[in-house]
Image: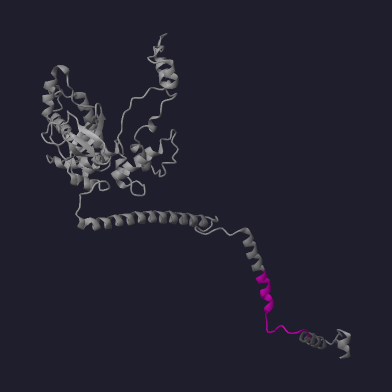
Amino acid sequence: MGMDSLQVTPISQANANQRRGRAGRTGPGACWRLYTESAFVSEMLQMTIPEIQRTNLANVVLLLKSMGIKDLLSFGFMDPPPQDTILNSLFQLWMLGALDNLGDITSLGNKMAQFPLDPPLSKMLIVGEELGCSEEIMTVVSMLSVPSIFFRPKDRADESDAAREKFFVPESDHLTFLNVYQQWAHNGYSARWCGDHFVHQKSLKKVREVRGQLEEIMQQQRLQINSIGTDWDIVRKAICAGYFHNASKLRGIGEYVNLRSRIPANLHPTSSLYGLGYTPDYVVYHEVMYTVKEYMQTVTAVDPYWLAELGPMFFSVKESSSDFHAKQRQEQEERRQMEYQQKLRDDLERQAKQEEAEALVRSGGQVVEVGKKRAPRDNLRKLKSSDAIEQEERPKGKVSGPSVVGNDSDSDSAAAKRRRAAGRKPRVRSAWAAAG
């Protein structure tokens, strides 16, 4: 969550060769290069750096998360972006509430993924619906999606500046855009009205088209379309919900400093807050433009309590010493909650593995019980041999029927009795037995 900047860099050799081909597209031509051959060889890259490796990926990461892809660092991008870029995008989405503490997408994140907008603008729309000002936020978001709606001809500069000041809302440039669109709508979307007030008619038509598309998406998502009327403080709070990470504090006359990155920025002379007569203590801005120095564009004054409410991970109201222990207890409770969520996630994964193993067993397969090691083959052989020995030894101590196991003399006398009963003489076993 740093500052996005547009840097001027040399073209690549591939771009230069592609532009050279334009000279002979319809017939023989000549290409005049405005650089030396040594600059072409030593200063230019062979290929252009892919855009995915040099832009903010918050919208891409949110889309992948909504598709169920969890491990983005090992995802198979064709041109893998730097890991720091992915981590910064994940951090931005967590900060906006699109991801939970475990990195999984939330219900808010699923709603944000349905809008073809930057995540902060999507967050503004959803919070605006909750606060009851979705119509006004739709207009503001649509106005931010087009270039500047005002034009300033050189021969009528003073006249155009005076016409522009009529639309100024002292607390916010966002509300100034809202005021322009509402005035255009009240005048029947007139082209003549745009010319009289130095406003681009084509830009406002584009705004109207974008606003209609956003309204259709909100209806598909079953989000209410409501209006707050003239209570525009609620609209400023919804704007703060999307851009609280770009909050700045007054440091001097017209000079601010970002509360998180400590980057200094100034009010642009065309801002409605520039000629307000006083400068608010806290503002949020849409972007920073660097020309001679850093200028904030599209600025809105906010209440510091809104920052503490909407961005508690960064901001808090200064508390007295009596509340210090209460804050510590709250931080400990949040830490325990994060640990509990991690444990719950591990338990769910373990349960899913056990259910999968049970399903495999029911289908006739074999699976090792989860959490236990497989027995070695030698140990299994020993167990089988010991079981066989026990089964062989067990019948020797038992016989069926009333007879019991005795000594050899008892067995011989029993055999002699059976032979006498059959009418046969007893057989002499040995000389010692005959002498006896």
**Where 280 falls versus 432 (above or below)?**
above
Residue 272 included in the magenta stretch of the image: no
Q: Nearer the viewer, residue 68 or 241?
A: 241
**Where 69 falls versus 382 (above or below)?**
above
Q: Nearer the viewer, residue 403 or 301?
A: 301
User: Which residues are the magenta region?
Assistant: 389-408
Colour mode?
A: one colour
Residue 399 included in the magenta stretch of the image: yes
Q: At 12% from the left edge and 41% from the top edge, which residue is drawn?
A: 231
Q: At 36% from the left edge and 49% from the top edge, which residue is drawn?
A: 102
Residue lying furthest bottom: 436
Q: At 89% from the left edge and 90% from the top edge, which residue is drawn?
A: 435
Q: Give the left or right position of residue 138, taking residue 169 as reference.
A: right
Measuring from the top left, give residue 243's x and y in whole percent: 24, 39
Can residue 405 be seen here? The reply is: yes
Quarter of the N terminus within the rendering: top left
Q: Nearer the viewer, residue 182 or 73?
A: 73
Can residue 224 be seen here? The reply is: no
